[in-house]
Structures are given as C-alpha cells and as structure tokens.
C-alpha cells in the first residue's frame, strides 16, 4: 500500500511540474534559478532528488517560458476629432431693441415690447429681466421676466407686462436690467 501511495505522489509531482513549467531544461539546469521546489527528506547530498521508480512514458524535457508562436496584438487607434465649442457673448443686452414703453389704464398694466435678434451661429436661450421705475427715483413700479429661445440668425418679439393699479398720474421709465444668453 505504501508503494502505491509513493507512485501516486510521484505522478502528482510530475503533473505539477508539467503544469507550472518548472521542469528541467536541456543540459539539466534550472530556468535561471526561478521556480521549482524541493521534495522532503533530510536535506542530504541531493535534497531535490525524488523517487527513482517514476512511471515510464512521462516527458523529461519540459519546455519553460511562454510559447513564441502566439499572434501579436496591436491596440486599435481611436478615430475621433475634437472641435472646440463655438464661442459666444453671454451678455445679450446688445441683441435686444425695445419699444412701446407704456401703461394701459384699461388693463392696469405696464407694457414694453422687446425684439430679440440672435446673431450667433447656434440657437440661444435668452433670460431677460425688465423693470418699470418711477421717473422721480422713488422706486420700482413693476418688473417682468421673460425666457425665450431664438434660432441662429433669427429674431423674436416679446411683450413684457407688469400689472399694477396706479391711482394718480405717474412718470416712469422702462429698462432691460439683464439679458443673459446661453446655447439651447
């Protein structure tokens, strides 16, 4: 029974050598001193020696290292081009012309007509704030906010309105306080 165990151990040992590639090269030298293992024993003259009754038919000249006939792999080169986004002026006040600063007594509302022309090469979204101020400087009478999208090279008309009941004749001014634009 002990002899059979030794043969099984020897076969397993040779199989491990074949799988790990740590066998002997031609000439009996190890692969640069890397890998390998020492089989038990007392560490006498030849501590790496194993059983002498190995089964016949097993290869004794085992290759080491990676096969040299593997195909090479070239990484694909990405094919894309980068183009910078178009530049634009975010201040849209120069794109606006205004007219009709008025107060409608029938609807009790301030009115102001804005014409927004987009000179950019792309569609732009405009965020516009309008104010009606008392001309004597006593304060704000009304305000409105408009958000519109205008196509490249096009224009659009917006009617700004602010509702307020006036009990006496009042002089006022209309103005666009801010007009921010950004690509839509």
Image: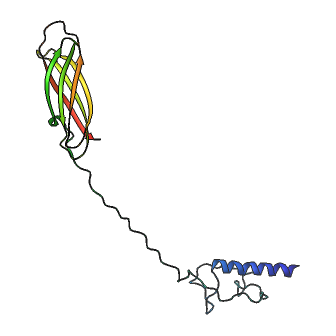
Residue at image position (86%, 79%) is 2
The answer to whether 172 is drawn above or below residue 51 in the figure is: above
In the drawing, does residue 30 fall left or right of residue 178?
A: right
* Placement of the N terminus among the 4 image quadrants: bottom right
Q: Position of residue 89 (x, y in %)?
A: 19, 42
Residue 148: quarter of image: top left
Residue at image position (23%, 30%) is 128
Residue 161: quarter of image: top left
Which residue lies most toward the right here? 1
Residue at image position (19%, 43%) is 153
Residue 136: quarter of image: top left
The answer to whether 126 is drawn above or below residue 81 in the figure is: above
* Placement of the C terminus among the 4 image quadrants: top left
- Which one is in front, 148 or 135? 148
Residue at image position (22%, 29%) is 158
Which residue lies most toward the top here? 167
Residue 37 visible in the shown view? no
């Amino acid at each position: 029974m002990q002899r059979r165990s030794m043969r099984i151990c020897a076969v397993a040992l040779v199989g491990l050598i074949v799988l790990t590639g740590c066998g002997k090269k031609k000439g009996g030298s190890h692969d640069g001193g890397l890998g390998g293992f020492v089989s038990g024993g007392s560490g006498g003259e030849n501590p790496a020696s194993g059983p002498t009754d190995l089964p016949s038919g097993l290869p004794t000249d085992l290759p080491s290292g990676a096969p040299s006939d593997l195909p090479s792999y070239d990484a694909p080169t990405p094919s894309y081009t980068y183009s910078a986004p178009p530049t634009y002026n975010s201040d849209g006040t120069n794109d606006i012309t205004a007219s009709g600063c008025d107060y409608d007594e029938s609807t009790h509302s301030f009115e102001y007509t804005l014409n927004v022309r987009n000179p950019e090469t792309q569609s732009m979204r405009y965020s516009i704030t309008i104010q009606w101020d008392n001309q004597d400087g006593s304060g704000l009478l009304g305000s409105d906010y408009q958000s519109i999208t205008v196509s490249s090279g096009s224009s659009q008309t917006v009617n700004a309105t602010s509702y307020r009941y006036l009990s006496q004749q009042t002089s006022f001014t209309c103005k666009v306080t801010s007009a921010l634009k950004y690509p839509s």
